């Protein structure tokens, strides 16, 4: 049993004050060991992205405890936190600065963390994500969606983090490009011993990349299960089963175990 | 055998740009009866431009040409703009991808539905309101009188998409083109919206063209599927016959999806053959 790299105990995030308080996350706990890959699944509004934002400090924690390699994480996050934890965002069209070249985008984390030998690191980072040095002086608008996502991954990896948080890394991409990015993520994970926390609404993508997964609904954990259970359909919660059925495509007969109308969707 | 609802023969959409002409749709032909037809392809394959060209919504400076483009016997290519305008919205309509961008943010849902109804039917405001309420109920919105007074930003994605469908179907069209109606929605809500579409199509006997990038979803929903690549139809499949796909592009597209059943690491990657685009 290896020591957990990241431990989250009873995380909760609340937005708003008084009567308008919304509990975006309520009592979410999990651990992540080095090299492991954990999936977070749920509908929009289930709080799956909020988990990642809470880890990185983009959403304020209103309760719970977060530990990285056994030590409590400080708020605001310190520099050394970001050398260990990096994030890749959903939309590669929005997460890269439109007026910075690829070179500037990749140089920024190196400059912030005062890492010498930037030139070589940038060329190496581009090679790692399968892009040649010819991409170095292009602007994001000169790249396709898949290439942009590769740049976003290179930016996350250039500091050699131990954990990479992936927020729907392929949902803005075409199916064929999604396959390339998923393969790249798997390769990089093997090469650098990375741990992933992957947020996705696509159960097949999560089962492909992760061994363990957590199902969230309205900020609460519904179930913690494994990809293997997802494959053979032995998941326990009704909600997970309904999601599994819905992801299999359209069935003309209305599903018997339709998802309970928790709200007027 | 009645005449098909929609006949498309050698449809082409061109965009003359400074750096040369781009052909988005390059000679596609199909006919549509009162059935569910799916058009599948990746971004840039011309699937949305096909839908827009049929309705006459191609953005300037795009040019549409076709050997024949006929809706219920009416030649759309020769039809004057006035006739096309009167067809559009009343007999053929389109549901757009994202309700957040396609609904007017400063009008209530009710106002928008009533407006689209009265634009095509000479009815009083009160009658239009009754029709709008009934239509919202048809798309299974609970408490339609409450929803009528809401603004688009107060709706969830699934509710917004249902409002769009209600708005498009209130005039009783015969042809509905749905451009990625569910891609902005969660899988669980997706099933719900599809089921509503399915029911309305079968009870009203409409023709439906469902445009999507999601091959599996389309194949499980539609009677026939057209697969588009680089502006051309590369393959036509019957519903549920995905396994019989012959074209390497279709097979590649199916193969590169991660599957819940059966694991493949690494995923097969689609190798594009320039010959497909020829």
Image (cartoon, rainbow, N blue to C red):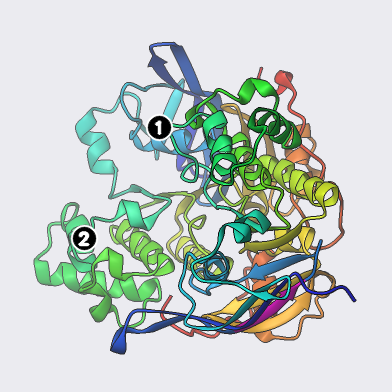
Picture coordinates of residue B168, whole percent (x, y): 33, 56
In-image side of A105 versus A123 (left or right)? left
Q: Name the residue located 21 percent from the left edge and 60 percent from the top edge.
A: B112
Mark 2 closeness class: few <14, some 14–19, many ≥20 residues within 10 Å:
many
Q: Secondary structure at mark 2?
A: helix
With A26 as the anchor, is B274 left or right in this view?
Answer: right
Residue B269 higher or lower than B129, as above or below: above
Q: Nearer the viewer, residue B160 or A160?
A: A160
Q: Nearer the viewer, residue B55 or A127?
A: A127
Asked whether residue A29 is drawn in magenta, I would say yes
Instruction: Return the residue at label 1.
Output: B53
Which quadrant would the N terminus of chain A be assigned to in this image?
bottom right
Quarter-wise, where is residue A38 in the image?
A: bottom right
The residue segment tinted magenta is A28-32
Give residue A247's quadrant in the image. Answer: bottom right
* Residue drawn at (80%, 64%) of the image: A34
Tell me the CA gap for discs 2 and 1.
24 Å
* Disc 1: host chain: B
Front-lying residue, B79 or A15: A15
Question: Disc 2 is attached to a residue of which chain?
Answer: B
Taking depth in this image into account, of A193 and B148 the one nearest to the observer is A193
Q: Which residue of the protein is positioned furthest toward the bottom in this rendering? A: A19
Q: Judging from the image, what secondary structure is the residue with disc 1 in?
A: helix
Q: Are marks 2 and 1 in contact (CB under 8 Å)?
A: no
Residue B226 spot, x, y in % from top left: 62, 40
Any part of residue A249 in sight: no
Magenta-colored stretch includes residue B51: no
Looking at marks 2 and 1 on the same chain, the residue that comes earlier in the sequence is marked by 1
Q: Is residue B97 left or right of residue A55?
A: left
Q: Which residue does the image show at 68% across and 74% down from the upper left?
A: A71
Numbered label attached to residue B112: 2
């Amino acid at each position: 049993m290896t020591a957990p790299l990241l431990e989250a105990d009873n995380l909760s995030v609340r937005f708003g004050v008084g009567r308008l308080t919304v509990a975006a996350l309520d009592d979410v706990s999990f651990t992540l060991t080095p090299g492991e890959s954990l999936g977070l699944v749920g509908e929009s509004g289930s709080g799956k992205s909020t988990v990642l934002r809470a880890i990185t400090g983009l959403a304020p924690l209103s309760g719970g405890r977060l530990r990285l390699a056994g030590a409590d994480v400080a708020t605001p996050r310190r520099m050394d936190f970001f050398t260990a934890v990096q994030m890749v965002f959903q939309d590669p069209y929005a997460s890269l600065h439109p007026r910075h070249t690829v070179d500037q985008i990749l140089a920024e984390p190196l400059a912030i963390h005062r890492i010498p030998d930037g030139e070589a690191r940038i060329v190496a980072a581009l090679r790692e994500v399968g892009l040649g040095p010819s991409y170095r002086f292009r602007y994001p608008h000169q790249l396709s969606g898949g290439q942009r996502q590769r740049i976003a991954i290179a930016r996350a990896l250039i500091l050699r983090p131990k954990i990479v948080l992936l927020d729907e890394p392929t949902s803005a991409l075409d199916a064929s490009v999604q396959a390339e990015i998923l393969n790249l993520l798997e390769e990089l994970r093997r090469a650098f011993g990375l741990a992933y926390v992957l947020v996705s609404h696509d159960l097949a993508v999560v089962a492909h990349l992760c061994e363990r997964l957590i199902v969230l609904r309205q900020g609460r954990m519904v179930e913690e299960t494994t990809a293997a259970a997802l494959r053979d359909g032995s998941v326990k919660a009704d909600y997970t089963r309904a999601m599994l059925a819905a992801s299999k495509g359209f069935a003309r007969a209305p599903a018997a175990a339709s998802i309970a109308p928790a709200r007027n969707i | 055998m009645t005449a098909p609802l929609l006949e498309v023969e050698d449809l082409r959409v061109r965009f003359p740009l400074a750096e040369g002409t781009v052909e988005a749709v390059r000679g596609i032909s199909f006919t549509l009866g009162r059935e569910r037809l799916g058009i599948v392809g990746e971004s840039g394959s011309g699937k949305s431009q096909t839908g827009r060209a049929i309705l006459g919504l191609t953005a300037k400076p795009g040019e549409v040409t076709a050997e024949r483009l006929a809706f219920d016997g009416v030649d759309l290519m020769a039809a004057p703009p006035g006739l096309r305008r009167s067809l559009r919205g009343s007999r053929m309509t389109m549901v757009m991808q994202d309700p957040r961008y396609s609904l007017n943010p400063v009008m209530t849902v009710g106002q928008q539905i009533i407006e689209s109804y009265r634009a095509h039917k000479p009815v009083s405001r009160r009658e239009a309101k009754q029709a709008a309420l009934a239509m919202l109920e048809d798309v299974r919105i609970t408490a339609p009188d409450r929803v009528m007074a809401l603004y688009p930003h107060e709706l969830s994605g699934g509710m917004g998409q249902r409002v769009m469908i209600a708005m498009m179907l209130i005039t009783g069209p015969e042809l509905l083109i749905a451009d990625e109606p569910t891609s902005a929605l969660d899988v669980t809500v997706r099933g719900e919206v599809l089921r509503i579409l399915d029911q309305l199509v079968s009870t009203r006997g409409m023709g439906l063209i469902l445009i999507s990038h999601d091959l599996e979803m389309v194949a499980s929903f539609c009677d026939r599927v057209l697969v588009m690549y680089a502006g051309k139809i590369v393959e036509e499949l019957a519903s549920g016959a995905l396994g019989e796909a012959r074209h390497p592009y279709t097979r590649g597209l199916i193969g590169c999806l991660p599957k819940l059943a059966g694991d493949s690491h690494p995923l097969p990657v689609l190798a594009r053959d320039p010959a497909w685009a020829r």
